[in-house]
Image (cartoon, rainbow, N blue to C red):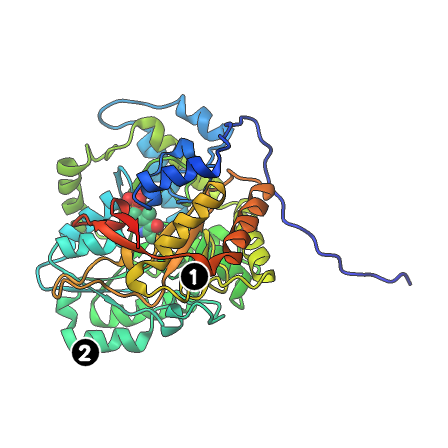
């Protein structure tokens, strides 16, 4: 008998690189000037001044040769483009919904869904807010109510499904407001603001059962549902032998519809959709789409864009793709864990989140620790991250005070299929450099504050 040792087998990219885009190397003096001119807001930097861009995974993915080939097959007819039917087929096959309304991106779908379903005074329970989702619910006259499990607010809690809805909280919400004031439960997969934390299949099933009992609909935010499906496969007993498409279909079977930002899971630069099972709601959505987005067979997308989404869906659900995508995020996360850098655990699907409260414990939340840390990372080496903390949380519409979220995070979001392992190493080294000089870092003061989604355009100066 020969002795066997178990060697670690690495994930690797299931693609090779065919086209490259050069990136500019800059000096620290240049970056210092750039961040001051940008009001210490990484959203206001010019991308040409950025070395490794981890601002967002939204619309920043690399498309495949097959998607680019599909772009040449755009049918740009105003009505009835064949690319719309290809998109419908892909959504129907992999998500299972009956009706599809294309939109220019995710928030277009959120706008339509909120306007057709929410009436003034309604309450919309959800598993932690997302910025645009919540704002559209509020603009439609509703109020968002957070019913995520408590573990989601604790960056050190290692539970595998920190995106779950707390059924007790949801029941209390129904008891307090009554089912007739709850138009739907807004249920996000792989909860972005919690650090990319997944929902278990058991929870999708239980929430749907509870809602059905009360006649409340369940609407998914399916933006990162493929990534959520991967975590169910790798973490939830009974799902290890199911395929990603099987898991995705089962998730969607516990819902009445979904909004989608195709700019994430679907590997495209622009696009989105709203899918529904109810014919009457679909007709209302079709009335809205022609007012705000475009005709019901393009909804703000060009024919070629719809074709890229249709092909992107097929690529997104391939196991080798999703394993390498999440494997790269885990690689970066593990490097930081090995160096004892405070990050949200477990590592999520689309990003590594630095815990700015523990990174810069000397800064009070009113001095914007996460905003400060994102600016410091940029100055250090041109890595661009973004704030997910008090600035993103906005103000309480009733009191006018800052919302003060428990999580004060810096998000390092990985575009899909764009960067290499060496870029991940440079990113980790940058964070370590800033970590070593963290005691000298001072906070920020907000000097310009937009009314809506302030994190995009707010400006700051050094305290
Ligand atoms: C990006 C995102 C949205 C909004 O989609 P856009 O395409 O940016 O308009 C909604 N929900 C979640 C979870 C997202 O990540």
* SS under mark 2: helix
Q: Residue at x 13, y 66 (%)?
A: 399
Q: Quadrant of the C terminus?
A: bottom left
Q: Quadrant of residue 117?
A: bottom left
Q: From what the image shows, is residue 144 above or below residue 174?
A: above
Label placed on residue 55: none
Residue 247 visible to the viewer: no
Q: For the point 36% across and 74% down, which residue is it? A: 150
- Position in image of residue 131 (x %, y %): 27, 54
Q: In the rendered structure, find residue 175 and report the number of the disc placed on it.
A: 2
Q: First in sequence, mark 2 or 1: give its number.
A: 2
Q: Cα distance, mark 2 to mark 1?
A: 27 Å
Location of residue 72 with respect to 196 vertically, above or below: above
Residue 322 in the image, given as x and y percentages of width and height: 52, 48
Check disc 1: other Cα within 10 Å, few if <14, some if 14-19, many if 20+. Answer: many
Which of the 4 image quarters holds residue 445?
bottom left
Name the quarter where the N terminus is drawn: bottom right
The residue mark sitting in front, 2 or 1, is 1
The answer to whether residue 317 is seen in the rendering is yes
Q: Which mark is residue 198?
A: 1
The quadrant holding residue 311 is: top left
Residue lying at the far right of the rendered structure: 1
Residue closer to the observer: 151 or 282: 151
User: Which element is circle 1 on?
Assistant: loop
Q: Residue at x 30, y 78 (%)?
A: 168
Q: Is residue 320 above or below residue 407?
A: above
- The spot of residue 442 in percent (x, y) is 38, 57
Q: Is residue 462 left or right of residue 230?
A: left
């Amino acid at each position: 008998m020969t002795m066997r040792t178990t060697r670690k087998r690495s994930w690797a990219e299931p693609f090779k690189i065919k086209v490259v885009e050069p990136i500019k190397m800059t000096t620290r003096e240049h970056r210092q000037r750039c961040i001051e001119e940008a009001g210490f807001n990484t959203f206001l930097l010019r991308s040409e001044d950025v070395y490794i861009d981890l601002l967002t995974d939204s619309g920043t993915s690399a498309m495949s040769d097959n998607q680019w080939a599909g772009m040449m097959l755009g049918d740009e007819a105003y009505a009835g483009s064949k690319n719309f039917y290809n998109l419908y087929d892909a959504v129907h096959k992999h998500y299972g919904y009956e009706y599809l309304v294309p939109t220019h991106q995710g928030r277009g779908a959120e706008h339509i869904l909120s306007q057709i379903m929410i009436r003034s005074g309604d309450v919309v329970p959800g598993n932690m807010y997302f910025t645009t989702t919540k704002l559209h619910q509020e603009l439609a006259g509703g109020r968002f109510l957070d019913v995520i499990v408590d573990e989601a607010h604790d960056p050190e809690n290692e539970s595998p499904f920190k995106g779950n809805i707390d059924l007790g909280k949801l029941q209390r919400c129904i008891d307090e407001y009554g089912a007739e004031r709850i138009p739907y439960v807004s249920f996000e997969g792989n909860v972005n603001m919690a650090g990319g934390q997944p929902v278990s299949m058991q929870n999708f099933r239980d929430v749907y059962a509870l809602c059905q009992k009360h006649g409340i609909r369940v609407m998914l935010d399916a933006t990162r549902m493929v990534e959520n499906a991967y975590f169910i496969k790798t973490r939830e007993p009974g799902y290890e032998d199911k395929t990603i498409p099987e898991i995705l279909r089962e998730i969607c079977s516990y819902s009445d519809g979904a909004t989608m930002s195709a700019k994430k899971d679907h590997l495209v630069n622009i696009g989105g959709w709203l899918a529904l099972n109810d014919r009457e709601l679909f007709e209302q959505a079709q009335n809205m789409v022609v007012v705000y987005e475009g005709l019901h067979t393009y909804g703000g997308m060009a024919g070629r864009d719809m074709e890229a989404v249709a092909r992107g869906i097929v690529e997104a659900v391939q196991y080798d793709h999703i394993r390498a995508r999440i494997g790269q995020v885990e690689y970066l996360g593990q490097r930081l864990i090995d160096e004892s850098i405070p990050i949200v655990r477990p590592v999520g699907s689309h990003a590594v989140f630095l815990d700015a409260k523990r990174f810069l414990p000397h800064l009070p939340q009113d001095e914007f620790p996460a905003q400060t840390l994102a600016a410091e990372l940029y100055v250090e080496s041109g890595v661009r991250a973004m704030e997910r903390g008090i600035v993103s949380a906005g103000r309480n519409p009733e009191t006018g005070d800052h919302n003060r979220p428990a999580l004060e995070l810096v998000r390092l979001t990985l575009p899909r299929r764009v960067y290499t392992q060496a870029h991940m190493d440079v990113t980790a080294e940058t964070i370590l450099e800033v970590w070593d000089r963290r005691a000298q870092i001072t906070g920020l003061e907000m000097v310009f504050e937009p009314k809506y989604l302030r994190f995009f355009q707010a400006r700051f100066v050094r305290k």
